[in-house]
Image (cartoon, grey):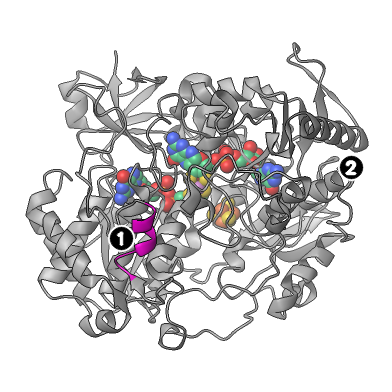
Amino acid sequence: MLQSQNTVCRLCSACCPVKVESKNGRLLRATRKSVYPELARPCPKLTAAAEIIYAPERLQLPLIRKNRKSASFSPISWEQAYDFAATQMLQLKEESGAQSVAWLRGMAADWGVPWDYANRLMHAFGSPNTIGNGSVCHVAREMANIYTCGAMPAANPQKSECILVWGKNDLDTAPGAGEAILAALARGAKLIVVDPVRTELAERADVWLPIRPAHDALLAMALIHEIISKKLYDQKFIETYGLGFKELKKTAANFSASQIAAECWLKPAEIEAAARLYATTKPACLIEGNGLDMQLETFQATRAVSMLRALTGNLDRPGGDLIPHPLKLRNLQLRERLPQNVRAITAAYPLFDNFHETWGRHAQSALIDSILEEKPYPVRGLIVQSGNPAVTMTDSGRVRKALKKLDFLMVIDLFQTKTCDFADLILPAASCFEETQLNRAYTRNNPCILQNQVVEAYGQSRPDWQIIFELARYLGLKEEFPWKDVEEALDYQLAPSGLNVAKLREHPEGLRAEALRYEKYREDGFATPSGKIEFYCERLKQAGFDPVPLANKKWQNPLSFSRELDDDALVAISGPRLNTFTHTQFRQIEALRRPENEAVIEISAAEARARKLHEGQMVTLQTPRGEVSMPLRISSRARPGIVIIAWGWGEVEEHLNLNNLTDDKRRDPVTATPANRGFMCHIVN
Ligand SMILES: Nc1nc2c(c(=O)[nH]1)N[C@H]1C(S)=C(S)[C@@H](COP(=O)(O)OP(=O)(O)OC[C@H]3O[C@@H](n4cnc5c(=O)[nH]c(N)nc54)[C@H](O)[C@@H]3O)O[C@H]1N2
Ligand SMILES: Nc1nc2c(c(=O)[nH]1)N[C@H]1C(S)=C(S)[C@@H](COP(=O)(O)OP(=O)(O)OC[C@H]3O[C@@H](n4cnc5c(=O)[nH]c(N)nc54)[C@H](O)[C@@H]3O)O[C@H]1N2
Ligand code: SF4
Ligand SMILES: [Mo]
């Protein structure tokens, strides 16, 4: 039977509302529902949805490694798989304590309820070690925003007159948000872009600041200084709602545009123009992105950036940056069940571990410290769900060593990835169209839209929720997972919000639990300890960090290997994400492989001339950690001094693995963030 149903696509984290046509439980095609159909561009991943979910390489059955010396796997039944997994986990628990088993989450299963279920299972089992990859993604930025204004604001470009895009490439990574920017530009809104790469948005910007990678903290402080010294800030708002403005003003005075411009590869006049345009055009919103992540100064850089919204009085005003209304949900994580005396492997980053009730632990690199260096104790068993750490984690050589050392590794995925090379057991997961779930994008902000199962699970694959609920039974944790299916579990979790699965299904356009309100701070204050915007943060001071960004820090080049490599080195950055792929995924899909999106290293024409390199030749990049080799592309997107390296190709060939180059020794002291994105490297040819 032909059917047309609504759901949310989760082939990448943009979580677009989509319509799916299916026949006899099989997906035929899917299309995005855009608010701006005239501006919408098709998403190639979604267009290829049927090819992705019915790819011949897709896992259909649980697989067990024949023996530790063998590279081949044999199919087994789900019962045998759960039994084997539970036996391994319980044996490790008996020998070394439950904490010797960790659960590592990649981004693909979402940070909504699937994250809660994994945490619940591990907490009930007795291990505090459910670890997400938020130290290299947006969770570190969430924390910085929460420390400043109590929440991660959501930009409202729909009503903005000026949009400041900082290290974000929405046209390729979040098309709904990208279209909202295009619509604003079409009605005359101004655009400022901070990005070292000439992206499509940078090309369209009124002011483009092609910043030297990882120098964002300096630029943010210079913008703050410019706005304060030229009296462009919202004095009334700051007097009423700000804490520590004087201290911020004093620190920012050390970072005037003329003092820092050269260090940031910018001109003072450009910085001044950006500050004036942003602060004098009302309302203005600020869209920050992954360009700010994966820096050694991610936390303080983002804190400084987040202060711009408050200084200009744009917080929680239409067209500014809205403080979200998260849905009221039951906290399912059972963290209170953990024995008091067990420390998490991420304990060296206590502020990051505890900044939020349900974000949990995200200092991803601490997992590798634990396995290899046994700090603070050894993790011996690992479950990897919806992630491909052998390729996506920092310093792949070190990660591979750690995966090899484990006594037990189980991977839950749709495909047999490079990470599976180290696995004892592989469980086939259902895709986003084959499972019902509630994604974080729709619980942190109203309106709430349900991701709906619209087709049957492929082969014997099972949804993530089902795998966790069933594994729980084999671990003797049936009471903690009493629900007969995900819908019952979702209804239980949604109860405080007044919503439930049935109501959400009836409203595919989404439902609000509360009416949209602006300027909520007038009644509620901000969710910081002082109830104010904390330009100065006592909690950070107490923990030994700068209470105002860069207050005591002597600025040093934060790019990895800047001390080890000579002047001939270039700044390498991970290429902006392509709209055809999600990280390491989908390279096996024929329809998504085109000559223009293959793995390449991009440099400017000037740089190629100076180094006598030509288009198409193979080049090798080297850092003290390792090498990658790819064909060279001479590109107008790259400025001199920079190499842009295609991201995610390590799944195809080891010599294409960008994380062979990255360094995990130096990290942001608050969030454990390594410099995956900006680091020095040599071209060796
Ligand atoms: N050098 C460098 N390193 C980086 C980055 C970079 O730009 N440069 N980016 C970083 C960022 S922001 C991130 S988020 C990470 C991403 O790191 P990962 O999360 O490891 O990335 P993916 O390659 O998307 O891996 C997701 C895996 O989940 C599987 N999968 C998809 N859907 C499901 C599902 O519903 N259930 C289950 N169980 N599995 C599923 C996919 O097949 C895939 O193998 O990489 C980080 N690492
Ligand atoms: N198609 C697709 N969509 C995705 C994903 C995907 O893999 N593919 N991944 C999802 C995930 S997990 C994430 S985290 C988001 C990321 O979404 P975005 O934040 O939009 O991510 P990127 O395109 O990686 O990077 C944004 C921009 O930051 C710039 N940049 C690089 N280094 C710096 C720097 O040092 N400073 C500044 N200011 N800018 C810099 C890059 O040039 C790029 O244009 O996308 C999500 N959506
Ligand atoms: S952008 Fe991402 S979430 Fe949206 S339709 Fe494409 S793959 Fe799906
Ligand atoms: Mo990410």
Cβ at disc 1 under 8 Å from ligand 2: no
Q: Could you say which is closer to the camera, residue 626 or residue 147?
A: 147
| Disc 2: CA contacts within 10 A as few (<14), some (14-19) or many (>=20) | some
| Disc 1: CA contacts within 10 A as few (<14), some (14-19) or many (>=20) | many
Q: Position of residue 305 (x, y in %)?
A: 30, 60
- Is residue 349 one of those drawn in magenta? no
Q: Residue at x 26, y 79 (%)?
A: 238
Q: Identify the element where label 2 is drawn.
A: helix
Which residue is most to the bottom? 523
Can residue 520 be seen in this snapshot?
Answer: yes
Q: Amino acid at mark 1?
A: Val
Cα distance in 3D space between marks 1 and 2: 47 Å
Mark 1 or mark 2, which has the lower sequence index?
A: 1
Instruction: Determine which residue is flagged by label 2.
Output: 474
Can residue 209 be seen in this snapshot?
Answer: no
Q: Quadrant of the C terminus?
A: top left
Instruction: Determine which residue is flagged by label 1.
Output: 305
Q: Residue at x 58, y 39 (%)?
A: 345
Q: How many marks?
A: 2
Q: Position of residue 628 (x, y in %)?
A: 41, 21
Q: Could you say which is closer to the camera, residue 479 or residue 162?
A: 479
When the figure is inspected, residue 11 is found, relative to residue 499, above or below; the finding is above
Magenta residues, start to end: 534-543
Q: Position of residue 407 (x, y in %)?
A: 72, 23
Q: Could you say which is closer to the camera, residue 404 or residue 167?
A: 404
Residue 287, label in figure: none
